[in-house]
Amino acid sequence: MDDYMSLIKGGHNFSVVSTSTRWISSHYMKADLIVNLDKRSYDNHIDHLSEGGLMVYNSDIKGDMDGIGISLTSEAKKFPNPNLMLGVGAIAILGATIGVNKTELNALIKNEYSKGVKENISYANIIYDIVYPIIGGKFQLEGGSKKRPNILGNQAIALGAIAGGLDCYYAYPMTPATSILHYLAAIADDFGLAVIHPENEIAVINMAIGSTFTGARTMVGSSGGGFSLLAEGISLGGIIESPVLIVLSMRPGPATGVPTYTEQGDLNFALNAGHGEFLRIVASPGTIEEAFFLTAQMLDLVWKFQTPGILLTEKHLSESSITVDINLNDTIWAEPLLHKDGEYKRYFDTEDGISPLLFPPAKEILKWNSYEHDEFGFTTEDPRWIKRMHNKRNKKFKSLENYLRKKKTINIFGDKGPIIITYGSTVMSVLEALKYGNIEARVVQPIFLSPLPIWELEKFKDQEVIVIEQSAIGQFANLLKENMNIQLKKVIKQYDGRPFDPIKLSKKIKDVA
């Protein structure tokens, strides 16, 4: 879990690495090893040291500090750009503590640091030799059962989109969705992708809709402020029935809010984005593995039902990384309904509301219209056509529900104990809190939020439930109350920009369970 401030230079930035021989789903703020490069870091993290843990600090920094002092700055001054080398010293301390040998350490530095490799390795070896006699192998790590990739949530989303047939990705950079753009741009040539950074989010959504007109599987990504600019285009996608997928990675608002931290405050916005009445498919992954498969599935769904879809996630999932097991054979490829024979009507009024698609070049007229229209796509103000096209688009609500009834729309973890309902990346925190606290509970995670799978959630109606979310006003709890008869025992909320810590969350669950 990376924690960094929204500052060009300076600020207190740190990373938390948690590891276990069992599956672990969230980070722990209580640490066995803390490496501080300055006094501010020491002061911020002194309370995060676990019992029996090691506090290592930069002894060249003035100030009252307890622990193991290492002259990180003095040793760095023997090399060019000493201020840029301190982080390598922290890696050397971590490596020595967990029992990594110097050969492995040097290979890691060579792979991860593209500049000054020779100097970085030399500096790391000096720090390693100082530290190892003191704490070498103190927290020796065991090897896992096999090698697994370690990926960011945003990388999982990007790869899931590719597995779902992605052709085009458009985005204007906005934390915490930006790394989807960077990652896809880096691998675009490998997968034949068009990855474009337009001048703003208004251009993003309009270019994306234009791409779907040609038959290109298209995705865009942003966060709250950028998503606001996308909203008019989402409504455009609703009336012209454009299968565009939007990734909304939430951060605290309103306005600029806290750009580099996490929250679930945009749920209501996502469910209602865009003016007018039309089908919006909204789904939220609970884990980084699920983010991969759900992105592919959502790209499939927007093409099947020809309507905008929103993959709703948060900074905590987008910018955290975890080891994963992903079987590419389980992915889904989009298969839209295509026109074959006879006269072509773009908005042909079918039984399920889904009209056959046709893409250029074609002999027939292909007309996607932002005004209300008839079946051919020609503008109309005839009340009969207005009503008929409303009814045609609205048929998709029932069609999608019938389709999803045959699919997995919720996850349930555990089979006894109190019922906890949560969604998104908070699922990772809840599952880890239950493990830590040795708590038996049934965790219910709706994967889809629009439509909310009431047919699956009905089994929990009239029962007391605990809702856990990262929203100040309890948006998720309110969504459940509006759509089903549940008895809220407690809503556990956190909205300070930080994800739940499993230890603290386990105590809150025990207090109300």
Image (spheres, rainbow, N blue to C red):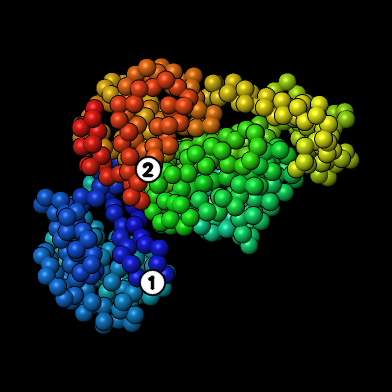
Which residue in the structure is indicated by mark 2?
472
At a point 22% along the width and 73% down the height, the residue shown is 72
Q: Quadrant of residue 74?
A: bottom left
> Which amino acid type is shown beneath numbered disc 2?
Ala
Rendered view: 453 above or below 173: above
State if disc 1 and disc 2 touch (CB < 8 Å). no
Crowdedness near tag 2: few (<14), some (14–19) or many (≥20) residues, C-alpha within 10 Å: some
Say what secondary structure mark 2 lies in. loop
Which residue in the structure is indicated by mark 1?
9
Q: Earlier in the sequence, mark 2 or mark 1?
A: 1
Rendered view: 46 above or below 440: below
Q: Is residue 340 visible?
A: no
Percent position of residue 138, x then y: 14, 55
| Residue placed most toward the observer, 99 or 345 | 345
Q: Quadrant of residue 421?
A: top left
Q: Which mark is residue 203?
A: none
Crowdedness near tag 1: few (<14), some (14–19) or many (≥20) residues, C-alpha within 10 Å: few
291 relative to 496 in the view: left or right: right
Rendered view: 207 above or below 107: above
Percent position of residue 41, x then y: 23, 64
| Residue placed most toward the observer, 195 or 78 | 195
At a point 62% along the width and 22% down the height, the residue shown is 398
Percent position of residue 97, x then y: 19, 58
Quadrant holding the C terminus: top left
Please state which of the two labelled residues, at mark 2 or mark 1, is closer to the viewer.
2
> Which amino acid type is shown beneath numbered disc 1?
Lys
66 relative to 58 in the view: left or right: left
Percent position of residue 99, x then y: 20, 56
